[in-house]
Image (tube, rainbow, N blue to C red):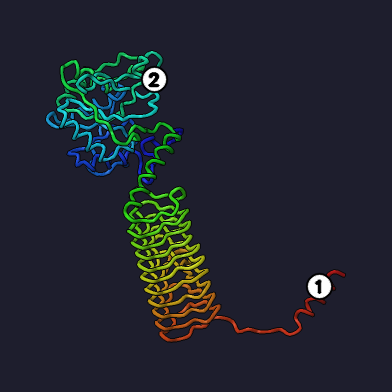
């Protein structure tokens, strides 16, 4: 991966690779989930509660996939099936795992591998079937001579996901050796051992051949991300969401979108963002862990951990930072930045304003270039603006300060004291006009040139 980040922690659509695999396990109500980590413990602190971890020690368990599963063997119950997933194959979801488990039980197998049929199998291992449909063997094809010409024509390939009876795995795995060029213990060798024991090994063909896609470099990560993104788009489209141009739209896996919402081109929806029914988002809006209520319109804006309740309007070119809340039918207009502030129902911040650490009452209208000066160089302070307040353009509130209901401020005012309810607050110098100033200025300029 050419990265300081462990491979399985690289993200696909808002979730690390290992997170997709753990979601598949959770989706089939796994009794226990065990992750095999490296001795350096790169996954420490990155796994959800309830997931157990074991460490693969090459000196004890051996290298390779067989060594990895050996490290977890003490956690395998002999009377229960165990599914082995790989941490870099995120397209194997809960439905695929459920299908594998069902086939394992129905066929009465000691082991069942997941397979897929590909038009171009490339160097993936081919599955050779016996006359009764069981798996006779898995043939590797990476090196010349590994497979016969007839075997290379087989389109069914091993996807690298397995289901074992617990007792079968515990019996076969200790007998898997490392007599190969890489000196590694390969889990698929356990299948041949079980066949030699007279036990049945089967295969379950996945409906979607993309299950074979794993990640070993950035190119493969991009390929997997494209498939995962397409699946996310399809899920929302089938649920009644309009995505005007999916090719230009990024939606993370945990984003929720209500029916009849419209996502315009160029949008990026990240994290745990929630979008209500009938909302219109975009074009070119980014929402990160944001809540956008029903019928909200958010145009060409950026929202981070902010909330816009029903019928609010945002943008264009608005920036809602963490803690910003727009109550029903409130407005954050063009070139408006709001941080840690509560904008009351129907209140408007139409344009060119910064509102930080403030509470704004219902129906208030803040004129252009309204600023809450919330930081004195040492601490943050709040501004409280009542209901139905009208501020003149270019008003600055130096917090902490309170403005009562129905109050007004004059344009260009710097408000440092309380404005009582219904009052007009004006804080500016009176205008003075100096007659003949331009003529005198020109005379001074002429003298300077001489």
State the image coordinates of residue 206 (x, y, percent, origin top left): 28, 34
Which image quadrant is residue 303 in?
Answer: bottom left
| Residue at 56% from the left image edge and 81% from the top image edge | 428
Q: Nearer the viewer, residue 266 or 78?
A: 266
Q: Nearer the viewer, mark 1 or mark 2?
A: 2
Q: Quadrant of the C terminus?
A: bottom right
What is the CA distance from the residue labelled 1 to the residue labelled 2? 85 Å
**Outermost residue toward the left?**
79
Category of crowding for the residue at label 1, using alpha-carbon neighbours closer than 10 angstroms: few (below 14), some (14–19), many (at least 20): few
Which image quadrant is residue 407 in?
Answer: bottom left
| Res. 138 in view | yes
Q: Quadrant of the N terminus?
A: top left
Q: Which residue in the structure is indicated by mark 2?
A: 142
State the image coordinates of residue 163 (x, y, percent, origin top left): 21, 30
Query: Of callouts 1 and 2, which one flags the residue occurring earlier in the amino acid sequence?
Result: 2
State the image coordinates of residue 86 (x, y, percent, origin top left): 30, 32
| Residue at 24% from the left image edge and 39% from the top image edge | 25
- Rendered position, 300 above or below 359: above
Circle 2 SS class: loop
Which image quadrant is residue 292 in?
Answer: bottom left
Q: Which residue in the structure is indicated by mark 1?
A: 445
Q: Nearer the viewer, residue 12 or 428?
A: 12
**Outermost residue toward the right?**
450
């Amino acid at each position: 991966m050419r990265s300081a980040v462990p491979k399985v922690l690289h993200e696909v659509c808002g979730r690390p690779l290992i997170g997709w695999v753990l979601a598949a396990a959770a989706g089939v109500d796994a009794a226990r989930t065990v992750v095999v980590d490296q001795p350096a413990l790169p996954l420490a602190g990155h796994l959800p509660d309830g997931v157990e971890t074991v460490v693969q020690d090459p000196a004890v368990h051996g290298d390779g996939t067989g060594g990895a599963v050996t490290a977890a063997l003490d956690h395998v119950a002999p009377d229960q099936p165990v599914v082995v997933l790989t941490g870099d194959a995120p397209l194997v979801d809960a439905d695929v795992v459920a299908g594998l488990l069902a086939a394992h039980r129905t066929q009465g197998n000691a082991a069942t591998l997941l397979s897929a049929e590909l038009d171009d199998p490339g160097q993936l291992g081919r599955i050779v079937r016996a006359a009764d449909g069981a798996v006779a063997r898995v043939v590797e094809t990476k090196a010349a001579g590994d497979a016969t010409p007839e075997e290379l024509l087989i389109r069914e390939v091993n996807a690298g996901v397995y289901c074992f009876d617990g007792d079968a795995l515990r019996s076969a795995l200790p007998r898997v050796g490392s007599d190969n060029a890489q000196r590694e213990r390969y889990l698929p060798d356990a299948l041949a051992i079980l066949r030699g024991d007279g036990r049945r090994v089967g295969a379950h063909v996945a409906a979607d051949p993309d299950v074979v896609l794993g990640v070993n470099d950035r190119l493969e990560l991009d390929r997997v991300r494209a498939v995962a993104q397409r699946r996310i788009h399809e899920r929302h489209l089938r649920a009644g969401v309009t995505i005007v141009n999916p090719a230009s739209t990024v939606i993370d896996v945990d984003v929720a979108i209500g029916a009849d919402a419209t996502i315009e081109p160029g949008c990026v929806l990240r994290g745990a963002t929630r979008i209500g029914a009938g909302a219109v988002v975009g074009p070119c809006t980014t929402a990160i862990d944001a809540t956008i209520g029903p019928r909200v319109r958010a145009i060409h804006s950026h929202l981070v951990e902010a909330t816009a309740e029903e019928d609010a309007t945002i943008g264009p070119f608005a920036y809602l930072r963490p803690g910003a809340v727009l109550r029903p039918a409130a407005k954050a207009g063009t070139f408006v930045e709001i941080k840690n502030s509560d904008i009351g129902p129907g209140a408007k911040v139409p344009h060119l304003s910064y509102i930080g650490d403030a509470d704004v009452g219902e129906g208030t209208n803040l004129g252009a270039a309204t600023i809450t000066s919330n930081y004195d160089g040492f601490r943050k302070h709040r501004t409280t603006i009542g209901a139905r307040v009208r501020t003149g353009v270019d008003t600055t509130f130096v917090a902490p300060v309170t403005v009562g209901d129905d109050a007004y401020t004059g344009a260009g005012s710097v408000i440092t004291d309380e404005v009582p309810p219904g009052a007009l607050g004006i804080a500016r110098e009176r205008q003075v006009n100096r007659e003949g100033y331009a003529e005198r200025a020109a005379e001074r300029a002429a003298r300077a040139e001489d």
